[in-house]
Image (cartoon, rainbow, N blue to C red):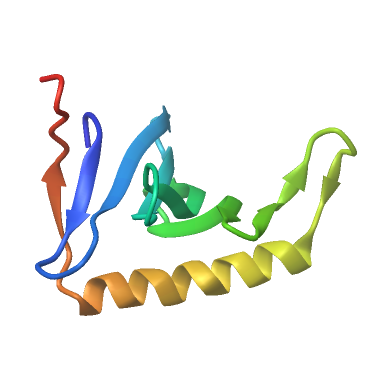
Amino acid sequence: MRGPAKLAALGHTDVHVDVIERHPHRLVLRMSHYLQRLHGAAIPDPDMTVEVYLLAETVGVLTYSDCFGSRKVFCPELMAFSPLAKAELNNFLEQWLTKLIAEGRCLTKAVFASQ
C-alpha cells in the first residue's frame, strides 16, 4: 500500500485502510468501517490502529474505538500495558478479519471526491 485504500465487497460497506507509519519490518495501519447515520456524516465504527509485522506475518491491535468508547493496549500517560485488553482486542481483530475475508473483500485504491 502506498496510500489510502479500501477493502471492498459487493453489498457491504467499505473498510478504509490508511498507513500511519512505515518501517522496514513493521507497518502501523488505521482500519475504519464507517456506519451511515440517519442524520449527519458517517462515523467510524469500529476504528482500529493495528501493527503489522511483515516478516512474522502477524498483526496486533494498538487502539480500538466504536460508538461506545475506546480502548488502548498501552497507556503512555501511565506507562501501563494491558495484556487483557491486548488479548480481547486481538480476538476481535481476528474475528473481524475472518469476516472480511469470508465476505470476499479485495483491496482497492481509495478515490476521494476532491481528486
Q: Residue furthest front?
A: 39
Residue at horizontal 23%, vertical 30%?
Answer: 3
Is 81 left, or right, of 92 in this rendering? right
Residue at horizontal 79%, vertical 58%?
Answer: 82
Compared to 45, does 100 lie above or below?
Answer: below
Compared to 97, does 74 lie above or below?
Answer: above
Q: Quadrant of the C terminus?
A: top left
Residue at horizontal 23%, vertical 55%?
Answer: 14
State the image coordinates of residue 23 (x, y, percent, origin top left).
42, 29
Q: How many marks do you count on the picture?
A: 0
Is 4 left, or right, of 80 in this rendering? left
Which of the 4 image quarters holds residue 99? bottom left
Residue at horizontal 57%, vertical 57%?
Answer: 67
Residue 91 or 113: which is nearer the viewer?
113
State the image coordinates of residue 10 (x, y, percent, origin top left).
9, 68
State the image coordinates of residue 81 (x, y, percent, origin top left).
80, 51
Residue 67 or 92: which is nearer the viewer?
67
Q: Quadrant of the N terminus?
A: top left
Q: Residue furthest right?
A: 78
Is 40 left, or right, of 14 in this rendering? right
